Image (spheres, rainbow, N blue to C red):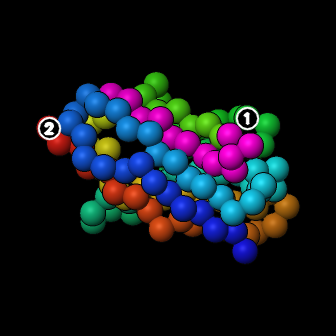
């Protein structure tokens, strides 16, 4: 069982920055693709960014050039640096771990990000 705990959400003005953190219960990054997803009110959950153990990243078109996903293996943590935030980035952001060799999928409880105009 993998536990994921997010932190770092909050209220920020448009154009501002936030850094989300996701602490994993153990050294899992070689076994999982890590990602961030978000869900805005009334909308489906959508992919924001993913990162593999080899460091390959993938971003939604809407966040390319503004968001950066990274990992710190020593701290068993995944980060999402969000710059130039827009009101449409407002959502609950969830950390995700998807098994590379299994079909296991784990989710964190989410952290709220609100961007005011």
Q: Is residue 60 visible?
A: no
User: What is the total number of numbered labels drawn onto the structure image?
Assistant: 2
Q: Position of residue 62 (x, y in %)?
A: 40, 37
Residue most extreme to the front: 75
Quadrant of residue 41 in the image?
bottom left
Judging from the image, what secondary structure is the residue with disc 2 in? loop
Determine whether, in the image, residue 117 is placed left or right of residue 22.
Answer: left
Above or below for 49 versus 5: above
Q: Position of residue 72 (x, y in %)?
A: 68, 40
Q: Residue furthest right?
A: 101
Left/right placement of residue 18 relative to residue 75 reads left
Residue at the (25%, 47%) spot, across then down: 11
Of residue 48 and residue 115, the one placed in the foreground of this image is 115
Residue named by callout 2? 117
Q: Which residue is mark 1?
A: 55
Magenta extent: 72-84
The C terminus, quarter of image: top left
Coordinates of residue 30 in the picture (x, y in percent): 82, 50
């Amino acid at each position: 069982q993998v536990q994921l705990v997010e932190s770092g959400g909050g209220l920020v003005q448009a154009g501002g920055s936030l850094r989300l953190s996701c602490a994993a219960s153990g050294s899992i990054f070689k076994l999982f693709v890590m990602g961030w997803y978000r869900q805005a009110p009334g909308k489906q959950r959508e992919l924001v960014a993913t990162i593999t153990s080899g460091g390959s990243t993938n971003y939604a078109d809407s966040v390319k050039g503004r968001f950066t996903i990274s990992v710190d293996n020593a701290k068993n943590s995944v980060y999402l640096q969000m710059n130039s935030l827009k009101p449409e980035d407002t959502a609950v952001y969830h950390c995700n771990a998807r098994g590379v060799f299994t079909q296991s999928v784990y989710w964190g409880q989410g952290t709220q990000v609100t961007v005011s105009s």
